[in-house]
Amino acid sequence: MIRFEHVTKRYADGTTAVDDLSFEVAEGELVTLVGPSGCGKTTTMKMVNRLIEPTEGRIFVDGRDIAEVDPVKLRRSIGYVIQQVGLFPHKTVLDNTATVPHLLGTGRAGARARAAELLELVGLDPSVYGDRYPDQLSGGQRQRVGVARALAADPPVLLMDEPFGAVDPVVREHLQNEFLKLQSQVRKTILFVTHDIEEAVRLGDRIAVYGDGRIEQFDAPATVLGAPATDYVADFVGADRGLKRLSVTPVEEGDLEQPPVLRLDDPLPRSLDARWAVVLDAEGGLHGWISAGQARGTGTVRDRARRMDARLPVGASLKQAFSTMLQHDAGWVAVVDPEAEDRFLGVLTPARLHTALRRSIDADAQDVARADVRLESVTKD
Ligand code: ADP
Ligand code: MG
């Protein structure tokens, strides 16, 4: 969908911002460009919508050499979100979002209806926020409007330049999660610039790690973390790689421990051959737990069970599991199946979490070995 062929950008003062860059982004793929300040990320981005012209090389979007596409037309097919959102201060949120569809010839009513849909999509209730002005929003809400506006023309391609850079870390994580959910619905082809490796890892299908004007590694997040291509990348990825892996390793069903399970309406068992049991309600949803000491005597499980609500969907990251544990001050989290009305699947304990982390690291090591073999067999042919 986006292809760079030997692209170089030298500014008038002789600075080489981007040096012989070649890479490709597939349709529907989210690629994060990550690297320290001044390494050429913004320059890369702005060449895609022709805000900056390359000195050498060619860029293709959807199969067409963009040098031959009218820049105004080109920009209509490319949404652009930046840190300083650039909303019109004198227009309401709804009008800000409706501007582009309106410019593209949608009637006023149609454009406003579309804008309301988009605000809904980014988690802003249009009946609450539609009539506000940008200065009546929090930083995080302004960023959402920025995203809604960029999606307004339904462009196949989105460029996002540190869109969440100015919001505080808690809001940022929230926006990132919502953005991932949004992307799973709209499936745009996205170039996303960030200087934060954590953000790059969480969001990217693949990551391009920039050194000075060059891509040092272009790979899936787990590969970048697990098998950095150069010392530079290893350094950039950081010493706490194990911790960062937590955020790219999903909880799988096979990782879970299976404690005994009791229902609220069950009579108390005679004994429990475990230290505790999980307690589910009549629908099979998580209610809490009961200790072996409590699970005796007369009456039903309901009388003695304690509430516990540390749960997360299967497929969530180990990092989320870890933080849910800490948040609930719990020694385990229940893992549920969001596809089946949160059916209880098992529990993740710190020990299982560690095993899952090892699994992820080992799997990666094997991938590297396989890649080497493939390379060898190619040269022999
Ligand atoms: P990043 O977005 O990764 O921080 P940029 O792409 O903005 O980096 O900049 C890459 C390099 O190009 C930097 O050294 C920067 O100072 C330089 N640069 C950016 N814009 C210009 C310009 N208009 N004229 C000269 N040098 C520039
Ligand atoms: Mg920049």
Image (cartoon, helix red, strand yellow):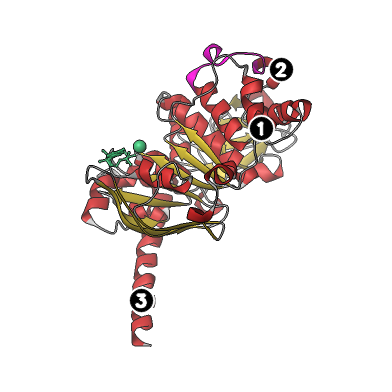
Quarter of the image where the C terminus is located: bottom left
Q: Which residue position holds label 3?
A: 375
- Which x, y percent locates residue 269? 65, 36
Q: Quadrant of ligand 2?
A: top left
Q: Amino acid at mark 3?
A: Leu
CB of residue at label 3: within 8 Å of ligand 1? no
Marked residue nearer the N-terminal end (1 or 2)? 1
- Identify the residue at the far bottom of this view: 381
Q: Which residue position holds label 2?
A: 127
Examine the structure image and report whether residue 369 is included in the region drawn in magenta. no
Q: Amino acid at mark 1?
A: Leu
Marked residue nearer the N-terminal end (2 or 3)? 2
Quarter of the image where the N terminus is located: bottom right
Q: Say which element carries label 3.
A: helix
Characterize the local packing of mark 3: few (<14), some (14-19) or many (20 or more) Cα atoms within 10 angstroms: few
Q: Amino acid at mark 2?
A: Ser
- Which x, y percent locates residue 333? 52, 36
Residue at horizontal 60 percent and vertical 31 percent from the top = 148
Residue at horizontal 27 percent and vertical 51 percent from the top = 233
Specify start and end residues of the magenta stretch as a single range. 129-139
Q: Is residue 380 above or below residue 184?
A: below
Marked residue nearer the N-terminal end (1 or 3)? 1
Q: CA distance from mark 1 to mark 3?
A: 51 Å
Q: Which residue position holds label 1?
A: 103
Q: Is residue 27 above or below residue 87?
A: below
Looking at the rendered structure, the number of numbered marks drawn on it comes to 3
Q: Quadrant of residue 360?
A: bottom left
- Which x, y percent locates residue 43? 36, 43
CB of residue at label 1: within 8 Å of ligand 2? no
Q: CA distance from mark 1 to mark 2?
A: 23 Å
